[in-house]
Amino acid sequence: MPANKKLLMLPGDGIGPEVMNQVRRVIDWMDKTRHVSFDVAEDLVGGCAYDAHGTSLTDTTLADAMGVDAVLLGAVGGPKWDNVERDLRPEAGLLKLRKEMDLFANLRPATVFPALAEASSLKTELVSGLDMLIIRELTGGVYFGTPRGIEDIGDGQKRAIDTQVYTTAEIDRVCRAAFDLARKRQSRVTSVEKANVMETGVLWREVATAAHADGYDDIELNHMYADNCAMQLVREPKQFDVIVTDNLFGDVLSDCAAMLTGSLGMLPSASLGAADESGRRKAMYEPVHGTAPDIAGEDKANPLAMIMSYAMCLRYSFDMGDDADMVEQAVETVLGSGLRTGDIMQPGMTEVSCQAMGEAVTAELDKLAG
């Protein structure tokens, strides 16, 4: 593999730098042991970028993100920046990255490792063996629609406006991405919206049905309202294979699915753009968890979601499926050995630090490679 595969690391705020350091550990291991090299650059995004530059994402950082093969992002935000203007807040930098890179498909797997089945808030039999994938449309919908804002309407009253808007093309491409990914899984897709009360839901169901009819007869497609989907996730989660939904519902449902696995600290994600003529996709990989400012700097964070986000990077950006499998197997074996960070701690297990968990993963990689 050429050494010019380029990664941009954006650790961000809170525990972001701590978990990213453990990914660096894995990358260094791959360089030394597997002779797989990456050109790795690092920059600021989020609150730390605002503190340094007065904006949560500089034009230079955005240009660098557009030029690399993949971006690894930690987490952004925290109460320190709650009073910053909305368009300069840490989250604005993340949203701009997603929008400018046109990362329209957000992949959030929810997989329950056998060692963590009892850590779920649901009964073990409901989640044991769970392996589902939520695909969230990421660049449209209510988070980007206009008009939006808060206005005075007199008599001491205000009115807030957010606009939910989708086009045929935006829906079509994310649904086709879901069908393509389902072919590598159990070939079942559940399209989720609120067609009973929302016009965007009506269009979503219409376009999803049309896309399915255009070359995806081998895929089973079902439609479900978002509120029912939320209920079914906690009632019978293993009924799902791939869920595809809009930006808002995907945000909510993927966090709901996260807790089925026992901890937000365990879930990776990938955000992918459209393939260019060479087949290359812009891509960003990040854990689902937030910045956890209450434990930032204390070496208590769970780095496994960040490490598994890197595994997704190997799989989707570099077609290194065997290496991705090895990283994921190392994580599963370490968990099976009883090591836990505080967020997934269970009786009888051994609590370890963020750094120790990273060290344990690379030690297991040594065994797998040997």
Image (cartoon, rainbow, N blue to C red):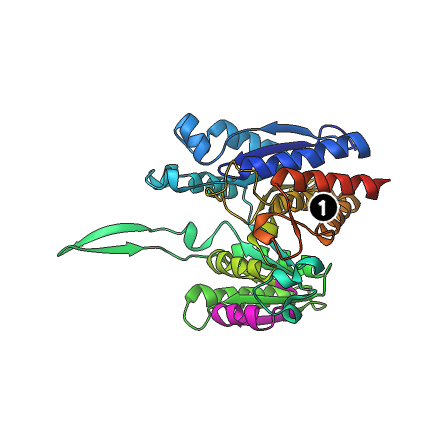
Looking at the image, the residue that sits furthest to the right is: 370
Compare residues 257 and 241 and report the one nearer the observer.
257
Percent of width and height locating residue 44: 51, 30
97 relative to 41, above or below: below
Outermost residue toward the left in this view: 155
Q: Residue at x 46, y 36 (%)?
A: 46
Q: Residue at x 70, y 68 (%)?
A: 217
Please, what is the three-letter code of the amino acid marked with disc 1? Arg
Image-based side of 327 in relation to 90, left or right: right
Task: Tally the marks.
Answer: 1
Q: Which residues are magenta?
A: 221-242
Residue at the limit of the structure toward the front, as seen here: 348
The reply to whether the magenta stretch includes residue 231 is yes
| On screen, residue 97 above or below 160 | above
- Which corner quadrant holds the C terminus? top right
Q: Quick check: is 28 in the magenta stretch?
A: no
Q: Is residue 258 visible?
A: yes
Q: Residues within 10 Å of mark 1 (few under 14, many from 20)?
A: some
Residue 127 placed where, x, y %?
64, 66
The answer to which of 161 and 234 lies nearer the viewer is: 234
| Helix, strand or loop for disc 1 | helix
Percent position of residue 229, x then y: 53, 69
Q: Is residue 350 left or right of residue 14?
A: right
| Quadrant where the N terminus is found in the figure | top right
User: Is 96 left, or right, of 147 in this rendering?
Assistant: right
Q: Residue at x 41, y 29 (%)?
A: 51
Q: Which residue is mark 1?
A: 315
